[in-house]
Amino acid sequence: MDAKNQQEVIKRAIKERSVRGSLECEVAQEIASELEVEPMKVGEVAKGLNLTLKNCKGKC
């Protein structure tokens, strides 16, 4: 999967699972695991969507 397509897949997963402008850190880590990407990548995409990470454990 190329980088642009990967980012779109991550965005879609985040949008499906975010709640009221935020994403739980645990959910971000689940997304990373499911998509086989680094949690930091999911955090970067979430921040690019202006979402806050809740209960962050420092991995995203």
Image (spheres, rainbow, N blue to C red):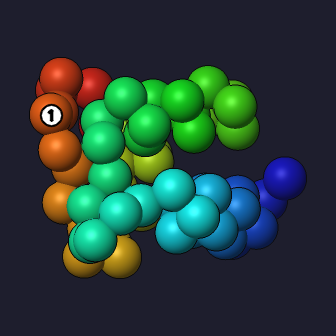
Residue 42 relative to residue 46: left or right: right
Image coordinates for residue 19, horizontal then vertical, percent: 35, 63
Reply above or below: 56 against 54.
above
Observer-nearest residue: 17 or 14? 17
Residue positioned 16% across, 26% down in the render: 58
Residue positioned 70% across, 31% down in the render: 34
Residue 37 relative to residue 27: left or right: right
Observer-nearest residue: 60 or 24? 24
Note whether residue 31 is visible: yes
| Residue 9, image quadrant | bottom right
Residue positioned 57% across, 39% down in the render: 31
Quadrant occupied by the C terminus: top left
Q: Residue furthest right?
A: 1
Residue for badge 1: 55
Observer-nearest residue: 25 or 58? 25
Q: Residue furthest front?
A: 20
Image coordinates for residue 22, horizontal then vertical, percent: 26, 61
| Residue 49, image quadrant | bottom left
Q: What amino acid is at disc 1?
A: Asn
Residue 17 relative to residue 4: left or right: left
Element type at mark 1: loop
Reply above or below: 16 against 54.
below
